[in-house]
Amino acid sequence: MDFKGSDALPGPRIEDHLPHTVRTAAKIVIVGGFGVGKTTMVGSVSEIRPLTTEETMTQAGIGVDDDYGSESKTATTVAMDFGRITVSDHLVLYLFGTPGQQRFWFLWNGLFEGALGAVVLADTRRLEVSFDVMGRLEERGVPFVVAVNSFPDAPRHPVPELRAALDLPEEIPIVECDARRRSSSRDVLLTLTRFLHSLAVTGSTV
């Protein structure tokens, strides 16, 4: 059969293949409220084409989805985002971004299954949303770090003030980030891997 001129799917890119040195894979969830930048983070840091399940926002979400600060947002994740990043010669992270709207939170338990750790993305304009998110992770026993995403119109606060506002214990890392930047998103994931390593070494849980 001649496929010349057909719409055949492109083959895998070189970066789609895992390095032969990789020995360990870990599942990481990127979680947070609506519009905090989860899809953006997965997309910015993934070394493969990110898989997204975004749909155009409709009238059905009015009064249901919290779109504070997201007036220009026209699409929303309805199932998950998926990406991958190789952080060392031996370790690869598979990233699962959760939907942020509360009406889709029932999907979270399935996405949390088998997760080694999580990144809680927070927005200083809506810090209160993070309490429910962190509570669900604590219920499932999933260790997490908090990454405060920088938005142009969001107030900036010193990390100690953010820690106090979120009632975070000292041992849980909290960092500032720009989810649009690959280097910043990667730094967040490296902070998480170091935190998970420290928990494994000490045998402690959070």
Image (cartoon, helix red, strand yellow):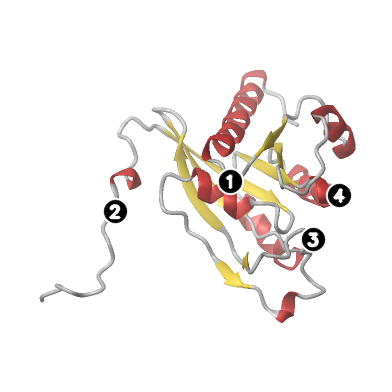
The CA distance from mark 1 to mark 3 is 19 Å
Task: Please tell me which of labels 4 and 2 falls first in the chain.
Answer: 2
Residue visible at 64% across and 22% down in the picture: 198
Disc 1: which residue: 180
SS type, badge 4: loop
Task: Please tell me which of labels 3 and 4 falls first in the chain.
Answer: 3
Q: Residue 135 placed where, x, y %?
A: 80, 46
The CA distance from mark 1 to mark 4 is 23 Å
Q: Is residue 180 left or right of residue 13?
A: right
Q: In this view, does 63 lie to the left or right of 195?
A: right
Q: Which label lies toward us, 1 or 2? A: 1
Disc 3: which residue: 68
Disc 2: which residue: 12
Instruction: Judge by depth and name the residue closer to the eye, 175 or 154.
Output: 154
Q: Residue furthest bottom?
A: 59
Q: Is residue 79 above or below residue 182?
A: below
Q: In this view, does 121 lie to the left or right of 130?
A: left
Instruction: Judge by depth and name the residue closer to the eye, 61 or 131.
Output: 61
The CA distance from mark 4 to mark 2 is 42 Å
Q: In this view, does 113 lie to the left or right of 52?
A: right
Discs 1, 4 touching: Cβ within 8 Å: no
Badge 4 amino acid: Glu
Instruction: Judge by depth and name the residue closer to the eye, 103 or 60.
Output: 60
Residue visible at 47% across and 54% down in the picture: 50
Residue visible at 78% across and 75% down in the picture: 62
Q: Which label lies toward us, 3 or 2? A: 3
